[in-house]
Amino acid sequence: MGRGRSGIYAAVAAIAATTGLGAVGAAGADEAAPADIYARDAGGPCFSEDAGATQCAAGETADVTINTGETVTFHFVGSQPHNAASDSGPAWKAPDTGYPTSGTATETFNNPGTYPFHCEVHPQMTGVVQVEGDPIPTGTATATATATATATPPSSPPPTTGGQTTTPNPSGGTDDIKPRVSSVKSTALRRAVRVRFKLSEPATVTIRVKRGRKVLKSARVQARAGTRSVTLRSKKLKKGRYTVEIQARDAFGNRSSLAKKRLRLRR
Amino acid sequence: MRNGFASVALLCALPTGGSTRRSLITSAGRRAQARSPFTPFRRDLPRIPELLPVRRTSTADVYDVQIQQGLAEVLPGFETPIYGYEGVYPGPTIRARTGRESIVRQHNTLTFESNVHLHGGFVPAGHDGHPMDVIPAGGSFEYHYPNLQDAATLWYHDHAHGRTSRTLYHGLMAMYVLEDDLERELELPTGEYDVPLVIADHSFNRDGSFRYLENVDLGFRGDTLLVNGAVSPRMRVDRRKYRFRLLNGSNSRSYTLRLGRGRKMLQIAGDGGLLTRPVVRRRVPFHPAERLDLVIDFRDYAPGTELVLHNEDGEAGTVAIMRFDVGRGGGSEDFRVPRRMRPREPLPEPVADRRWELGFGFGAWQINGKDFDHARMDARPSHGTTERWTFANRSNRVHPMHIHGFLFRVLWRSSGPVHPGERLGWKDTIGVLPNERVTVQAWFAPYAGKYVFHCHALEHADKAMMLQLEVMT
């Protein structure tokens, strides 16, 4: 979203507001017009639409309606640091960085919709900006948060000093291929079992040495693809017959089938 | 409450669609609605996998790690998207030995930059994970960890500037256990009786994914405790001594650990390795990024006892950390925790005193009124010297202060005597309580170069509470 953008679009918006040419969608009780919101501490903290009040009412929030292209001005009249940041959707912040304790910051909305916001320092301070009217094309990038994936060599610095880079949430991934465990060989040692196996992709491998149904020793390793070898040692592994079970699970939850091998410890 | 009067966390765990913050329902109310995935003690404690090296040479172990996305099963029946080392949460543990180098090839397959910091390790400056030394998306870097230090429980995690509060929350962290000959001589519990425990607080969305709510003032507070990636799990233990390596992997929540009703726990090690002697603890403050090695002797309890590890600073879902179910049998054990563990090395006298004021300045959290600026050096200690650093907390939030690459001894706290568990060993992270002053003696050895020091409450660190230091030869 453009923010405080001067030029033809702001001028059009200003004219439209004063002559009532902006779209009129009477959704709320307010008439759509450029709005002022006050970030106040006393009794709160809260966002308030009331310029003259000295105290926040209990549970007070700001709910303003503007036309597309108009500007919301945030006044920082408290003594604590505040800002206004979008809850969801296209990211915006007023001001872009920092948490002022005085002065104002503005945000211009060019697209209709509902824009809930909160203070990043005090998330219980909330408000909503309702924007009505037709979208105003801006010709500049919209406010979708883009991660700054730079291809710079390690020593050159990305933007810093208070600037918060936006990190996307993980989205999961779509891997449906099950890992395969093959060529399982188990070797009997003294009070130990060495298991060698071949793994088709990087996976978490669980190896269990059992006697009947009782697990005597188990190990969990993270292995890369290829032939790997794990030794399980325990004083409980005396002479006798054992079963070795191996199962692999890859990073996306796909499990291999259970591979079993019988083995006899003679010493 | 440690965090000042406004620290009661009310977090909406499962939001409805739309304006979540307009109708705040307490987390207890939400959890009552969706009881089953959050019921504590339903799952057994998951065992963190150990990373297998891809190659072993005569002097080093070589590991290959991919920084990638993955799906973890945190809530039973749900899949949680995570970022993880090799796509698992918590990441695979690297077991290293003193004197043997570990070479870790990290491949960044994420869409944004990342890097790896070995927290608590003595690492040359270029391999320490300075926030400006990042691996770009799609790139790789080979980290060399000399492992020339005493045995300790370390951990490695992402340290890209401005991203850590989210990447660590979504799972990009893992343990790194360094062992040496002294620990082997002392015959401390090993194998399945040496258990790493990563404790972190999270919140969840209705689909089981992690929910992150930014709170720059207090730091993130989740409403559910995860240990090794499971909600308040239970662990079946034999009646013998166990060594638990606890890591506080929360973004910024501090805990006070208590076993049962104040049962005895023996602390044998802190951040920087073994203490000079074991210390009995019944109530342990535990701040983000700190490590605690506790030996618990389950012979003191009858078979069938269920012993809960509590967090005294928690509320609702953040009180019960995990439960130990004592099994049958056992009861006879030769091993006794030795009374003298690591000798205390003499330190050179401090050559300088520095004071760091911690507070919320204009726009962000600051140290001495300054933000993080990668072009500015804020301290230039000399290599091989020690200095007395005092952290003065001018805010009413806890700040766990951490220095990269070096260890320190805690000399004095204004809130009272320094507990033996902190005084008798080395530390790299110290929780500075509200309005408290803490003096530590830091030793700037063995490597020189550019490092950083910062508050390890990740929301504070990302909003600029970090400064640079350069150790000059």
Image: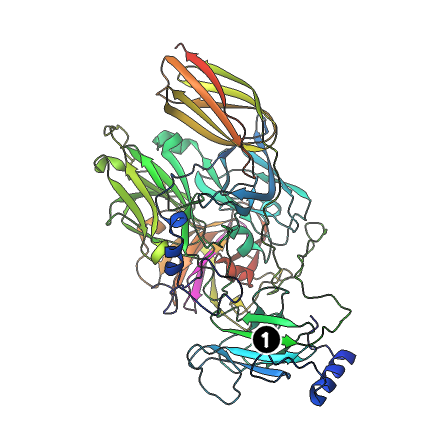
At horizontal 50% and vertical 69% (from top left) the residue drawn is A121
At horizontal 48% and vertical 17% (from top left) the residue drawn is A261
At horizontal 42% and vertical 31% (from top left) the residue drawn is B181
- Magenta stretch bounds: B382-401
Tell me if residue A267 is in the magenta stretch. Answer: no
| Frontmost residue, A155 versus A240 | A240
Instruction: Work out whether A69 lies above or below B70.
Output: below
Q: Subunit of mark 1?
A: A
Q: Which residue is mark 1?
A: A129
Q: Amino acid at mark 1?
A: Val
Instruction: Work out whether B243 lies above or below A126.
Output: above
Q: Residue furthest top?
A: A266
Secondary structure beneath disc 1? strand
Residue A98 in sight: no
Report the side of A138 relative to B178 (left or right): right
Q: Position of residue A198 (x, y in %)?
A: 58, 23
Quarter of the C terminus of chain A within the rendering: top left
